[in-house]
Image (tube, rainbow, N blue to C red):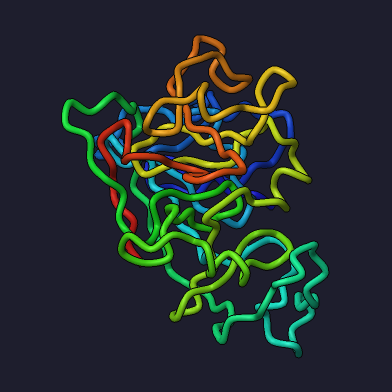
Amino acid sequence: MKKLLIFGVSIPMLFLGISFSSCNDSDDQVDPSANDSEELPEVFSKFNDNIEVYVEGNFVVIKSDGIPDHNSPYFSTSDNRYEAYNGSNQAFHLNPNRITSQNYTFRIPLNPAEASNKQATSLGAIGVAVNGVPFFNQYAGPDQPLTNEINSFDQYNGHPQQTGSYHYHIEPLYLTLEKGKASLMGFLLDGFPVYGPEENGQSVLENQLDEYHGHFGVTADYPEGIYHYHITNTDPYINGNGYFGNPGTATN
């Protein structure tokens, strides 16, 4: 049964027809001492069932073990989620790391806004996909492009680093195949959403995006419009020259 955590309280979803935007209904038993007054936006219902999502003050908190919801050659061969590489990259090579469970807590702004002083992304998690897997930026290391590392990406375009943290630097193919290339892929730490490589039935081109790899516009989840990032198939892939908004935190 899916549970939605609101104001730090786990609430079972007893009926599929319940609305995620009505998290403060009178039937919900909320601690009156809690000082959180915001509802969890409905868009966050798109995270997988096993991921905890709740509002805490001015932040949405997302907790994940970082394990992908698809198979990979980076699982142990004795794991039923192991799948030998069957992608199209003939230069693929398996790196020595294997996927292990993590303890991620992402805290992203509930009401994201453009930052007056933009911050560069750092190595490590810069956001989180709807399946709980972190997004990393376009670098394999400090100022090191993905030129060689990209050959270790599995058939779904992810791989683990030394601590076993599986992540995506580029288009998460499992998600775009399952949900569609124009769908919500996740959020960056600044709270702004990340969408796939298509919009309005067309591929998104780099020249349609700003230096942060995003633009303002209407999406299915934000009918009034919002700044949002797009994943593309060329560098910088997910994010460009830093966060458009003020980033929250990712701890592990």
Please state the total of marks drawn on the protein image. 0
Give the percent coordinates (x, y) of residue 51: 55, 54
| Above or below 63: residue 186 | above
Residue at 51 percent across and 24 percent down: it is 207
Residue at 74 percent across and 84 percent down: it is 79
Give the percent coordinates (x, y) of residue 197: 64, 34
Instruction: Give the quarter of the image for residue 214.
Output: top left
- Whether residue 215 sits left or right of residue 82 in the image: it is left
Name the outermost residue toward the left: 117
Q: Which of 36 and 82 lies nearest the eye of the viewer?
A: 82
Give the percent coordinates (x, y) of residue 33: 25, 39
- Tell me the quadrant of the picture where the C terminus can be found: bottom left
| Above or below 179: residue 81 | below
Residue at 69 percent across and 73 percent down: it is 92
Q: Which of 153 and 125 lies nearest the eye of the viewer?
A: 153
- Whether residue 180 sits left or right of residue 58 in the image: it is right
Q: Which of 89 and 121 lies nearest the eye of the viewer?
A: 89
Residue at 16 percent across and 31 percent down: it is 117
